[in-house]
Image: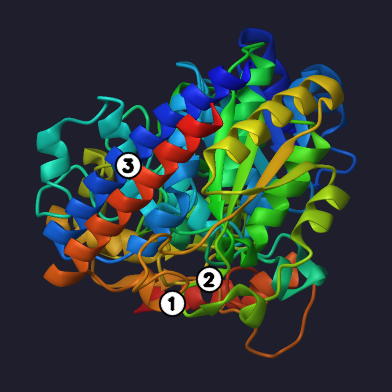
Amino acid sequence: MTREGAAAEGVMLAERVFSVKKRFLAMYKKANAGHIGSALSCAELLVLLKFAWMRDDDTFVLSKGHAAAALYSVLAEANVLSPSQIDSYHEDGTELPALPPFNGIKEIPFATGSLGHGLSVSAGMALGAKLSRRQSRFFCVTSDGELDEGSVWEAALFIAHHKLSNVVWVVDRNQIQAIGRTEDVLALEPLDAKLRAFGYYVIRVDGHDFAALLAARDECLRAIETYAAPVAIIANTVKGNGLTYMQDTVDSHYLPMTDAQYEQALAEVTHAHALTVNRSRNAG
Amino acid sequence: MRAEFVRAMLALFEKRKDLVFITGDLGYMALEGLVEAYGERFVNAGVAEQNAVSVAAGLARAGHLPWVYSAAVFTVLRPYEQIRNDVCLHELPVKLVGNGAGYAYGIMGATHHALEDVGAMRALPNMRLYLPLVATDLLPVVNAMAEDPRPNYLRLGLSAKIPGEIPAFAAWRRLKPGRSAVVIGMGPVLQGLYELGRPDLLDELEIWCVGNFPLEDIPAELSLSIKEKRRVISIEEHYRAGGLGEALSCLLLMSGVLPEPLVCLHAAGYPSGRYGSQRWHLEESGLAGHALASRLEQLLRA
């Protein structure tokens, strides 16, 4: 891709993620719900996958189900979910509960929320596609705290052993799990070395920078072509990214927004978006 | 039952090619034929049952018919949440196979026995259990499971050796008539009734075998027998909690068929803290041998 093309794609993604963030912030505010930090840490990742990587026959699994609002917002951005479905988020009788449900929404193949399941079901679907000689790919975003679960490492072994290069595993490495920092609770680092030792082609990338993420995508595609190895992207992110009052705190996992915080969040997200677009345009 | 199960799986693969057989690294001197026949559709997922079950769910979502094989205790209990969430919640046709249920692993000890597998599986939504009794059950059971769109659990043990003609596998089948009490059992533990060396006792017992959970409605013939004989004895190689006796008592109560008394014979666990063969544990639990004979005598005299 040309430099101009990459810049244009970056701007498109920036517009998408701005819209996605505004939507899920409104959802969280209306629902008076938490997990805002978890959605903000993976928003760019989900937007990259949906709008700059996945094809129609690819499948996405949000293993860190607690960021469901980000997933719903991305699906609304892609016109998969309707405004009225989004409006019902978190309410009695909704199709969109706080964690991804199983209720026939094709883009949500598995209900998640209990951590440590998504990578395995992705591996199963990927093995199924291989056995059926289908070219479809499977994208799974896990959290980092989720890596405490033994089942994740069972899946990691399985994917590597079976060379399931049709699985792309993205770790949202925001450094914070439910009630502590990952390195204080159960240290994960050096995570890239661990995954390399398992047999993965590992890319560590700024998970909020679309230029870097697009380069990581291209590197991934080349690696899959060249090595036929499974790929893991460790996306360095910030929990609650962009919201100065909550970012990089445990609170951002739990607390809903006050009216003032919501206004501040919208202002900060809008300001950051303007800066990003300007920077991308100048780069192009 | 394991050899017959493997033969049935080989026969099934002749008919349909969407099967995937996953083992949790068990099946020495048993699954080798499947390895050869299934080729890339045979997967040893390693000693990693949680991943194996979720992988099976993913395979089922992708249109395949996965079977997951391990020792019953490892098939059911280690990946219980994966069975609950990824399989049952999504109503995916994943076929779980537990070998060596009950005390079948004998002297291997308590960590290898499965005495709560039925209760655990019964509690799950959309799950249908298959409990074969004799070797000839395996072919129809495997075929029925392949046609069953629900998640299933197959409880394997050592095939029972029961004299006389055994009716074809069914949700309920009467194994023999009897004079004064109705016995309802599940799986090979029923063999113990025929091995007491007490034809006088056996003549008293009308014996029924259940093949599935959830229990299907009580057949009219059984209902009549219970109304006539009153005395009902359930027998199972499983703890009482969640087992046949509990399921049966609920069904009888709901059907208005009230036995007097209902006696539940079930696994007692490890009351002496000592270990032995399957037979030894069954005798210690009063599910075989002299202990069973004297229990039955007592009940029939009452």
State the residue at coordinates (61%, 34%). A124
Location of residue A87 in the rendering, given as x and y in whole percent from the top left corner: 11, 44
Crowding around mark 3 (Cα neighbors within 10 Å: few <14, some 14 to 19, many 20+) is some
State the residue at coordinates (39%, 55%). A40
Badge 2 sits on which subunit? A
Q: Amino acid at mark 3?
A: Phe
State the residue at coordinates (63%, 61%). A147
Residue B236 vs residue A93: left or right?
right
Q: Nearer the viewer, residue A133 or A194?
A: A194
Q: Are marks 2 and 3 on the same chain?
A: yes
Q: Amino acid at mark 1?
A: Val
> Please, which colouring scheme is shown?
rainbow
Q: Is residue B6 above or below residue B111?
A: above
- In what element is the residue under mark 1? helix
First along the sequence among labels 2 and 3 = 3
Between the residue at mark 1 and the residue at mark 3, the CA separation in whole angstroms equals: 24 Å
Badge 1 sits on which subunit? A
Query: Which residue is disc 1 drawn over?
Result: A250
Furthest residue in direction bottom, as rendered: B272
**Rendered image: mark on residue B50:** none
Q: Nearer the viewer, mark 2 or mark 3?
A: 3
Q: Nearer the viewer, residue B257 or A113?
A: A113
Contact (Cβ within 8 Å) of mark 1 with mark 2: yes
